[in-house]
Amino acid sequence: MKEFELVLPCYNESKSLKTLLQRAVSAAEEAGFDSKRFQLVLVENGSQDNSKEVLTELQKTELSQWFSTVIVPVNLGYGYGVLQGLKNTSAPIIGWSHADQQCDPRDAFTALKKLKSVEKDKVLVKGVRSGRNWKDKWVTHIFEILAFLILGIKTKELNAQPKIFTRQLLNSLTAPPNNFAFDLYVLFCALKNKFHVETIPVLFPPRVHGVSNWASSFFSRYKTILGMVKYMCQLSRSQGRV
């Protein structure tokens, strides 16, 4: 059995996949892991590019021992893809990050080290980002305020990656959303179930390829905020506050 598995949901990331894998393998080796103890779970989340073909070719290389794939035929949302990846893990410590190269794979191992240093059974470690533009920081701050007022969640950077946690949390995710509210839901469940939450600082540089689905325009940011407020209210009505 693996000791640690990291899920990476991939949507239209064909240009990044090989570099991402190489960086992740290097990070794992630097942290003292081999492919018997650590595995990446790459979720091909219904991409419209040639990501599936790229993954097939990568499975023929020496990198194949380091990763498994989960194929989602039709994209049903970011959260759905992450959940499918998590369901295909078996390690006692699991988690996810992003595949767009804004998230350094080394951060996952930094989070893992932090988790192991906490002498508790139920732990979640997440990133707190730096290097972001003021518009994204503004949206994030709004999310933080609303999450506290509506759900009682008091934490920074709800959507920051990575999120690494002990496996018990997976069983608590009984009704997760398929969209970008997935991060919020996981934090809510962690706090509701008395998980100890720790943070690590992470650098969040500009994207190498592609554009953000939620932050590409003022309209997309506005739509995302409204959607999150609606979801927070629904979650509060169904499960109360932390």
Image (spheres, rainbow, N blue to C red):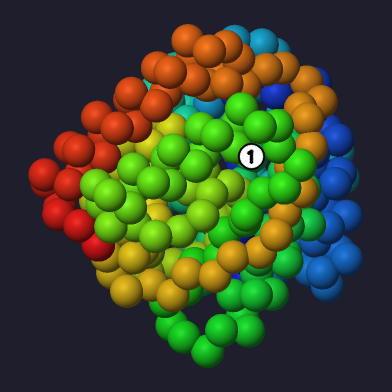
- Residue 85 seen anywhere in this rendered image of the structure: no
Q: Secondary structure at mark 1?
A: loop
Residue 205: which quarter of the image? top right
Residue 183 sits above or below residue 222 on the image: below
Q: Position of residue 65 (x, y in %)?
A: 76, 51
In the rendered image, the residue lying farthest to the left is 237
Relative horizontal placement of residue 1, taking residue 170 as reference (left or right)? right
Residue 205 sits above or below residue 165 on the image: above
Residue receiving disc 1:
98
Q: Position of residue 15 (x, y in %)?
A: 80, 21
Residue 117: which quarter of the image? bottom right
Number of marks in the image? 1
Q: Position of residue 25 (x, y in %)?
A: 83, 53
Residue at horizontal 46 percent and vertical 86 percent from the top: 120
Residue 121 sits above or below residue 2 on the image: below
- Residue 224 seen anywhere in this rendered image of the structure: yes
The type of residue carrying mark 1 is His
Q: Quadrant of the C terminus?
A: bottom left
The front one of 49 and 212 is 212
The front one of 23 and 226 is 226
Residue at horizontal 38 percent and vertical 72 percent from the top: 195
Q: Position of residue 14 (x, y in %)?
A: 74, 21
